[in-house]
Image: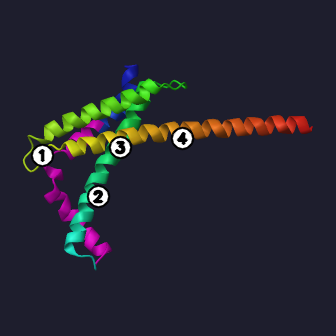
């Protein structure tokens, strides 16, 4: 059951993504909440502009949910290990892309939804962006540790 402690949050997130692919989250349904909120925030914007912003928000949601999903997958693949492997990042992106395809296939059966290869591309891009971000954060941490170590050596020499 050790694997469950590493993967349970990833499985919950996958279920959440699946839920977002149901009929409850069609453009028509989300526009009932998002567009009035946008209208309240920006009362002078044209209706067409509000609808365009709504679509942008929906597409950014794709990127964001798969960004998080990709980080959770990486967490599970690393299994608490400190070392890093490019294979883990590539594996996470591959799993994200496969799940995105499966999710779009699921949507093709949901009334009011449809499958879109562009959404798969957005989802996979969100997953890849997460892996690049994780690599940059780790690299930044390494640079900070090296700078601290260099400063400690310089202080010892000065003494």
Q: CA distance from mark 2 to mark 4?
A: 26 Å
Image coords of residue 139 (percent x, y): 57, 37
Disc with the residue nearer the chain's start (3 vs 2): 2
> What number is the disc on residue 137?
4
How is the rendered protein coloured? rainbow
Labelled pair 1, 4 in contact (Cβ < 8 Å)? no
Q: Which residues are magenta?
A: 14-43
Labelled pair 2, 4 in contact (Cβ < 8 Å)? no
Q: Residue furthest bottom?
A: 44
Which residue is found at the position 65% from the left and 38% from the top? 143
Which label was assigned to residue 126? Answer: 3
Q: Is the residue marked by circle 2 packed among few (<14), some (14-19), or many (20+) residues within 10 Å?
A: few
Name which of mark 2 and mark 4 comes first in the sequence.
Answer: 2
Residue linked to disc 1: 114
Figure quadrant of the N terminus: top left
Q: Is residue 30 magenta?
A: yes
């Amino acid at each position: 059951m050790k694997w469950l402690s590493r993967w349970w949050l990833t499985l919950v997130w996958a279920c959440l993504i699946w839920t977002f692919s149901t009929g409850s989250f069609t453009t028509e349904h989300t526009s009932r909440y998002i567009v009035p909120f946008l209208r309240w925030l920006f009362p002078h914007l044209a209706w067409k502009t509000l609808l365009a912003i709504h679509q942008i928000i929906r597409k950014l949601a794709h990127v964001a949910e798969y960004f998080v999903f990709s980080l959770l997958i990486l967490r599970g693949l690393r299994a608490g290990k400190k070392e890093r492997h490019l294979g883990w990042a590539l594996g996470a992106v591959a799993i994200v892309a496969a799940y995105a395809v499966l999710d779009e296939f699921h949507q093709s059966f949901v009334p009011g939804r449809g499958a879109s290869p562009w959404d798969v591309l957005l989802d996979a891009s969100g997953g890849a962006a997460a892996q690049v971000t994780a690599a940059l954060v780790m690299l930044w941490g390494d640079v900070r540790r090296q700078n601290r170590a260099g400063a400690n050596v310089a202080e010892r020499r000065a003494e």
